[in-house]
Amino acid sequence: MFKLTAALLIALSVLTSPLARAADLQLRVGTLAPKNSLYHRQLMEVGEAWRAAQGGAAKYMVYPDGSQGGEAEMARRMRIGQLQGALLSVVGLREIEPSITALQNLPLLFRSWEELDYVREKMRPAMEKKFLDKGFVVLGWGDAGWVRFFSKEAAVRPDDYKRMKFFAWGSEQEQQAIMKSLGYTPVPLETADILPSIQTGMINVVPSTPYFALASQIYNTAPHMLEINWAPIVGALVVTTKAWDAMTPEGQASLRTAGEKAGLQMRTQARREVEEAVDAMKKRGLVVHTPTPADMKEWNALAEALYPRIRGTMVPADTFDEVFKHVKAYRAQSGK
């Protein structure tokens, strides 16, 4: 009887040990990215590498197409343990750490990808520490192209858009308030609502990357694109520290390496696909409008008017100032 009891206790201790729990770990990862897209494929590759290193009965599942809700909802699901990770843009990342908005919510600030990369790398160590303090590990940084305006009617000047209704992220109330104060009409929605809303006329214009406009078929209903690099869509793959701490050291090392590799692949290919997506849509009826120098003067004036309103509201003041400092330094050293 003693031997049987001892054996049961040993078996129970093995089943409840950290190694056993690590072997049975499940990573459920959400994303808005469409199934079989570049981003979805990269997430699947990350999972294969992690499962091989983690071993045991470790499971890895990706939920694409926004099936776990919008980005704010995915951030909430990670906090309560329904998801262990997510590939998010700044819209979702800001729900974890607001200072990340400095990389995406400053219109017409970044003149090139090289400029954005320089600023992000300067801010990266401190930014990742902030996420870690909030309970999240950043595995890799990506982006998804420049935001351009897709509308039902032709528009090239800022005032042309004042008669239209804009898609706006439901969670970004500060942005909606700023838009209204400048005479624009934001309509708060989630990503899944964009296509039916533009088809029914609830909205007339969608700020979107060309890749997303092509993948979601937005351009069929909003066939006019303003060729302006309004802002970059910046994102990151994150997992909760609870899930991270439950992994084996081999699983952690593999996941970090795979995450870094996926981030680089996303950045490299997404930037190339911007023009490829535009070309594909042009062949199917998209009309591209290029602003004149006079038009760009108006757009730059609008951006300059927006910055004081964004500082301290959409972007924390200290991070806002830090980004402008790094941009100034980059231009000084590069001569651009």
Image (cartoon, rainbow, N blue to C red):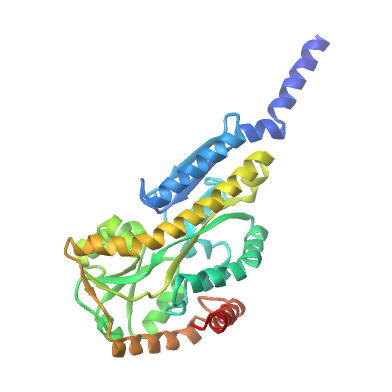
> Who's the residue at 44% across and 88% down the image?
304
Q: Which of the 4 image quarters holds residue 228?
A: bottom left
Looking at the image, residue 194 sits to the left or right of residue 313; the answer is: left
Q: Is residue 199 in view?
A: no
Comparing 269 with 99, the one in front is 269
> Who's the residue at 67% across and 45% down the image?
245
> Residue farthest to the top?
1
Q: Which of the 4 image quarters holds residue 111?
A: bottom left
Looking at the image, residue 181 sits to the left or right of residue 223; the answer is: right
Q: Up-down: is 53 above or below 140?
A: above
Looking at the image, residue 20 sits to the left or right of residue 159; the answer is: right
> Who's the residue at 39% across and 85% down the image?
181
Q: Residue 22: horizontal and vertical position, in percent?
A: 65, 35
Q: Is residue 184 in view?
A: yes
Looking at the image, residue 267 sits to the left or right of residue 328; the answer is: left
Q: Residue 64: horizontal and vertical position, in percent?
A: 40, 47
Comparing 217 with 15, the one in front is 217
Q: Up-down: is 305 above or below 249?
A: below
Q: Residue 265: horizontal and vertical position, in percent?
A: 47, 54
Q: Up-down: is 211 above or below 52?
A: below
- So how many labels did they put on this image? 0
> Residue farthest to the left?
285
> Who's the residue at 28% across and 82% down the image?
291
Comparing 55 with 17, the one in front is 55
Q: Residue 208: horizontal and vertical position, in percent?
A: 34, 66
- For the N terminus, the image quarter is top right
